[in-house]
Image: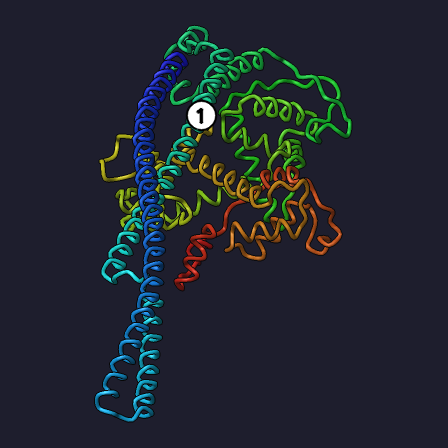
Amino acid sequence: MLKAVSDERTRQIMALQEGEKVEITVLKKEKLYLLKVINKMKEEQGSLQTQVNKLRKDVAKEYMRYVNECDARKLLLADLNEMRNQQLETSLRQVQDVKGEDTVKLTLALKIARQDLTKAQVELNTMKANYGDVVPRRDFESQGKKYSDLCEKMEVLQKDFEDLRREYDTLLEVHREAVEERDHFYNELQQVQRSSTPRPDWAKCAEVISGGPERWSYLEEGKTSDKLVDVLLEEIGTGVLKEKDTFPGLGKGDKVPLYLRFEGQVKNKKLSKKDVVNILKEIWKEKVSADQQKGKQSSLSEFFLSYLQKRYGDSLAFDWTYTIYENIKLYRSNEAMSLFYDILSGKVDEALYHSQNQLICNLLKELTDSDSSNSGTLTTEQFSSTLRAAFPLKSSEQLQELIDASRYKAGSPEDLIEYRSLFSEDEEGNAEPFVAKLYSQYASEKQEYLQELRNELGHVPEVKVDDLKTAFCTIDPAIDDLTLDTYLGLAFQASREQWDQTVPLPVDTVMERLLARDTKRTGPPPETYYTCQSEGGETGAYNSY
């Protein structure tokens, strides 16, 4: 399997390299093409700028020529006017001489004519001075249009260039990340190749396991290598346990659990799995009954010893406690023994056992209520709708996993599910795949819930009561006050009145305490919850879960 994975990873790396080479080649060609386009545009821009500069110089020359001509024209006009005046005076004199008109009158008329001429000349000079260098409006508008078109083209090209540059930078970043990911996978592959060992041939175990290949085939069905190791350890431990006739007592120290405080040798009762599971069920049954009568929950370790003392006497009680303890410590793959051991040793809270039982009882009741004919079977649609109503917080994938686990038996018709058989147990207390899947989903949901809580708390080394309360309300806005107070009390091991005096605790300590308790989500995630609130929806269905 590792060789196949290695070859597959190598092929993937080679494929990525080939794909990257092709993409890089295409990008380089495209880059060169765009650079050529940009250079061409720059050349055109430079050419146009050169033309504009040349035109400006030509306009300046023409302007100077026009100014010079204007000045020369003014001089010529002045000379012409002077000559006209002289000619007019001469003609007037001749007319006066001929006609004998009044000289004063003619002089006055000449003066007025000269003033009008001067005024007209001033206006003409003003007009020439103001509009002498003005180009035709048609030429001005044509040049303005050409300039605006060039500006727009320049802006488009500049924008395209910026987009290409950003795209190129993005491709470089993607390429860098791909290279880093490739190197990471390659290093992981090298590490796996160095540290991994060949997959063991589990079929060899059939030759040494009691019961032969048939029993080993039953034991290895659907188990991973890690679980198969546990099975082998249990089989080896079973043989060792059966060979022991006695167990050494651990003494009567304070660190020794109450049910193991004994000095000397205790007898090994050599119980089978079935016997141990039956005793554990009887202990749970008696403890629940006793707690209901007392109105409070007692310690399992104390009740464990008192129950065996009451049943077998003080002299033999420790023989049974040691025998049962060694068995449940050995058989970790058995759900009933494993849970009893964790609760007995204080790793998890007893509420976890009762919560799981309540979960199963509620689901069985829901399925029974849906079975109106009391036939013990439900259609796939009825079964699916009942599961969706019983577990509104589960995703569609989780519900489908439960439906698939309910069809592990082929004895019922395709569209019918014998729901009662899903809750049965074998003689060793192992649950059916459906219930086992419920337990595994329960554990995974709890892990995800606490991981969200840790992420919400951030990387702070210590957490206060208010901080934990805020984090709970953030990731689970539908949580009620009673449940919130319970979780805070479990985390800080203090009552509500003592929270003000509670010192901050390390985050890991808080998480360990919550993980050992029956901690679960009480309502929908924040995004779903606030969406329902904004739409006027009800969250009662979630709270019932």
Q: Is residue 441 left or right of residue 50?
A: right
Residue at 51% over, 28% down? 277
Residue at 34% over, 25% down? 24
Q: How is the image coloured?
A: rainbow
**Residue 372 percent coordinates (x, y):** 29, 51
Amino acid found under the numbered disc labelled 1? Glu
**Residue 21 percent coordinates (x, y):** 34, 21
Q: Determine whether the residue tagged by mark 1 lies in a helix, strand or loop.
A: helix
Residue 416 drawn above or below residue 482: above
Residue 209 drawn above or below residue 364: above
* Front-most of residues 458 and 337: 458
Q: Quadrant of residue 518?
A: top right
Point out the image quarter for the N terminus. top left
Q: Is residue 355 left or right of residue 316?
A: left
Residue at 41% over, 18% down? 220
* Front-most of residues 385 and 455: 455
Answer yes or no: is residue 250 visible: yes
Q: Which residue is mark 1?
A: 181
Q: Is residue 469 left or right of residue 21?
A: right
Residue 241 drawn above or below residue 524: above
Residue at 60% over, 36% down? 348
Q: Residues within 10 Å of mark 1 (few under 14, many from 20)?
A: few
* Front-most of residues 485 and 116: 116
